[in-house]
Amino acid sequence: MVMQVSMTMASLKPVLLMIFLSFFNLETCKAQVYLYHNCSGSNTTANSAYQLNTRTLFTSLTSNASSAEFSNATVGASSSDTVRGLFMCRGDMSAAPCQQCVVNATRRLLSECALAKQGVIWYDECMVRYSNRSFFSTVDTRPRLGLLNTANITNQESFMSLLFKTINETADEASNFSVGVKKYATKQANISAFQTLYCLAQCTQDLSREDCRRCLSGVIGDLPWCCQGKQGGRVLYPSCNVRYELYPFYHSTASPPAPSPSPSLLLPPPPSSNSGGSSGISAGTIVAIVVPIAVAVLIFIVGICFLSRRARKKQGPVKEGKTAYDISTVESLQFDFGTIEAATNKFSVDNKLGEGGFGEVYKGTLSSGQEIAVKRLSKSSGQGGEEFKMEVEVVAKLQHRNLVRLLGFCLQGEEKILVYEYVPNKSLDYILFDHERQRELDWARRYKIIGGIARGIQYLHEDSRLRIIHRDLKASNVLLDRDMNPKISDFGMARIFGVDQTQGNTSRIVGTYGYMAPEYAMHGEFSVKSDVYSFGVLLMEIISGKKNSSFYQTDGAEDLMSYAWQLWKDGAHLELVDPILRESCNQNEVIRSIHIGLLCVQEDPDDRPTMATIVLMLDSNTVTLPTPKRPAFFVHSGTDTNMPKMLQFDQSTTKSIPMSVNEMSISEMDPR
């Protein structure tokens, strides 16, 4: 006996549509992706009121996640037991995966940070954090996390330029919403006819427009620290994050165009009424229609999921290409000499901005209206072809908000010219050591400049593709933009280290006496700690408003460092501070900065902190600083105080220590 099943086309269409949509929901093909967590702050005790309040808080956040992509809450009656927390789901997440992510995140925090009073956890789909301090509506930048795809971009210069343009446009859009509105945006840009760049930016909804943009500026500025020249990467702060990839890692909010009918998806017309028999469709016909469609869609979904996972997890080996830089890699930046002449009005005296150790600097204006700074190396300067190539090769590959940006160069005949972005406030020494203009640098600006210089040098030492030693860090090589943000310049003396190299020796000492570390000035030994010493001297100059060189045999001290040391021992720290700042400065920040400066100029390089540690010391008041030792005084080392700037030593040698460089993620944690 054969059973006949009838079904009209009208009833069949909703069934087919439901099958198709249920298979096509891509969110079902990927699990929650855990990224990183950090536990910090002091510890509570098991089953304490604070721990119980934390559990209550997490229950509340999980419940709220069923209907919102962001929520914050506070639990606790007394100030000592009060715990605050929030969650934020990625802006394209729907309610179900958002809530599931918050559930997973809170469970993991309860397990990993059971007794910690502060914690933050990142998943690909959400972020959850809690703390015993009030952090709502506040920009928090630590701890920070960087994740990268180790595969390199082919044309890094043009790619990074496109990336920063697109990611900043994304940040502008994400921050352009009022408090309480989703601060999330995505953008894409064409790299070529075959490649697309996808960008995402998001802030927590409790931030104001200004704070959101400021936070996003921070994470964008850290992209070189994380992901310079890589095919994908992201930087996450507790308050905001950005990400870019060469594949679509988010769900587009735009409605996709309706697909054109395909012959394989067309259903046969219903049988005409005069065909006789049943007016329905037999079970065999339904099966013949539905099964191939379902199988085809399922295969399509599995293929999409496979490709998506493969793209996310692709971790190819790092391909450095050439082991030594060659000037041909930056030929696309080359300017014609006639263009430079026209921009500077034939190097007019009226356009001259200043004169450095290797030549003169002019202001210029290109035909497009863009203002530039032109560094024309003197033909008799010590910087020949090698130093010129060094500066081009180094600076062209650097992307950081606290480093001056190289726009191009000109190498024609005997002319060697570098073209930089124009920085209107000239160099730090023009303002810092000018009795009239130094009032423009209040303590808040000086502290901002100190932090910016530290982050710029940290990028050179640890976060750029190769380890770079500047070797001539001083006030005249720090430029100030319109907002008094510092930009480190002049890389003519820089040395590139291999990835496994930590220090080296040279027979040719270059730099400025007074800023040079003693081991470098006397023995030609240089390392990242040489720059740390120079930073310490510069920090003391910024605090005091006085040149290190002006202290020779004055104020009862040989130099500024010995003067600062004497005041430190006597407990008279604030006497070092520029008199115009003493009434208005933040004394805790000043004293901490002097302490850091003294740590930087200790005689033994091993006693000096790294730039990463210095940045952490400046950013966090909870880091305990070690007691500084007596600074390195050249006089006590038996060195003539009239030591010339250029010295000759024995033939160079190189020392190296192996280091691991294939890190997939970078994180910076709060101290416990």
Image: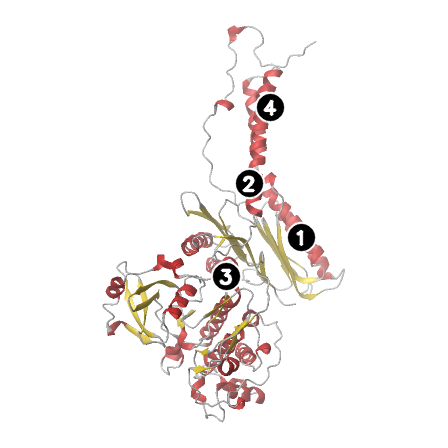
Front of the two marks 2 and 4: 2
In the image, what residue occupies the spot 45% across and 67% down? Answer: 402
For marks 2 and 4 on the same chain, the one whose residue lies earlier in the sequence: 4
Q: Is residue 248 visible?
A: yes
Measure the alpha-carbon separation of dots 2 and 4.
Answer: 24 Å
In the image, 642 versus 608, the foreground residue is 642
Local packing at callout 1 (Cα closer than 10 Å; few below 14, some 14-19, many 20+) is: many
Return the residue at label 3.
465
Viewer-nearest of discs 2 and 3: 3
Which residue is tagged 4? Answer: 291
Residue type at the position of mark 4: Val
Q: Which residue is mark 1?
A: 106
- Is the residue 101 above or below the residue 458 in the image? above
Vertical order, 481 against 279 (above or below)? below
Q: Which residue: 64% across, 12% down?
A: 4
Between residue 140 and residue 548, name the one nearer to us. 548
Residue at image position (36%, 58%) is: 331
Q: Which mark is residue 566?
A: none
Q: Secondary structure at mark 1?
A: helix
Q: Amino acid at mark 3?
A: Arg
Report x, y in % for residue 330. Answer: 38, 59
Residue occupying image coordinates x 51% and y 81%: 523
